[in-house]
Structures are given as structure tokens and as C-alpha cells.
Image (tube, grey):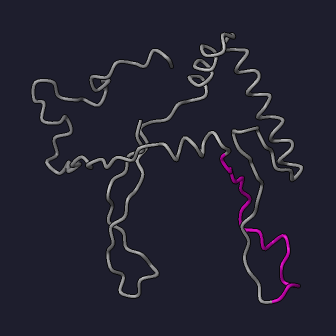
Amino acid sequence: MALEYVVTKRVFGFDKDKNEKYVARSVRSGRVNFAKMCRKVSQLCGVHRKVVDLVVSGLVDIMAEDIDDGKSVQLGEFGIFNPTIHTKSADDAKDVSAKSILQRKINFYPGKIFKDTLAEMSITRREEVETDYTNGGGNGGNAENPDDGKGDNGEAPDPAE
């Protein structure tokens, strides 16, 4: 699978002329929710999905406790979770206090597995789909089957949910 990007027009505030520039913006191909991830691990490891759910939930709980204690948490070659803060600067050291903290964050530093995955991942440009809906249609031009806003828009429900 490839990491996809689209070309996007941006105006950067640091440019005194406020010129428009073009940048690559990554586009995700979807999201795997917790239940689906547990099912996939269950199939891979040959254990019941609820056991995987229980172990991962326990791991997250213990990680939260350790991070709350100000510790970094390393999960082998998976990576390191590191609690950190973003703060306001001050002209004098005596003006720096807990009130200077703007945000608490957890930084994730990927381990070898993810670094190798990223290094080997292909990158592909995706052309953006035209999304001009100014004709007022709302049903994609399908006059035989207008969308009354109550239907499923032709989509089958996801059996995994």
C-alpha cells in the first residue's frame, strides 16, 4: 500500500507578500477502529478477540498510569510514548510557572518496525476529485432515484459494526 498525497494551495503567514504556495498534503486511505484491530490480532495470534481486547485495554490503562507519573513508556520495537508540554516563553525566569503551560501532549517516537515501514513505503500522488456541488442536485444527477435524505445513499451497512 502507498502513502497518498494531494497538491494543496496554501497561504503562509511568514511570507510578507502572503503569496500562495503549493504543498503536498497526505491523504489517509481510512481508519481501522479498535474492534477491527482486535479481530485482526485475534486471527493472527489464534486467541479469542475478547482476550486481545482485555490485554490491549489493560496495556493502555497501565500506560496511562505510568505517563501520569511523568514516565516515558517504551513498547519494544513499537516505539516510545513521551509526555511533554508546550509553554509560553517569558523574559524573566521568575515569570515562568505552571500557568505558563499551554498544553500537555504525548509525543510518539516510532521504533524500528515503524521506521522501517515508513522508509519502505511508496508515495503516490492522488488527483483530487472535483467537489463542485453548486448545481443544487444533491443526488449526483440521478433523477430516477432521488435522495430524500432518509435512505442509505445506496450503501450497505458495515457487517463489522
Q: Is residue 94 magenta?
A: yes
Side of 22 where 29 appears, left or right: right
Above or below: residue 32 compared with residue 83: above
Q: Residue at x 32, y 58 (%)?
A: 7
Residue 61 x, y percent position in the rendering:
80, 34
Above or below: residue 37 compared with residue 135: above
Q: How many labels does the image show?
A: 0
Side of 91 where 1 appears, left or right: left
In this view, the residue farthest toward the left is 143
- The image quarter in which residue 37 lies: top right
Q: Which residue is drawn at 77% across and 84% down?
A: 90
Q: Residue at x 69, y 54 (%)?
A: 107
Which residues, given as a range, are shown in magenta? Answer: 92-110
Q: Does the magenta stretch include residue 55?
A: no
- The image quarter in which residue 63 lies: top right
Quadrant location of the N terminus in the rendered image: top left
- Closer to the camera in the image, 41 or 111: 111
Above or below: residue 73 compared with residue 86: above
Residue 13 x, y percent position in the rendering:
45, 79
Residue 148 x, y percent position in the rendering:
24, 29
Above or below: residue 12 compared with residue 26: below
Side of 46 where 54 appears, left or right: right
- Closer to the camera in the image, 23 or 31: 23
Residue 48 x, y percent position in the rendering:
68, 10
Q: Which residue is drawn at 16% across and 41% down?
A: 137
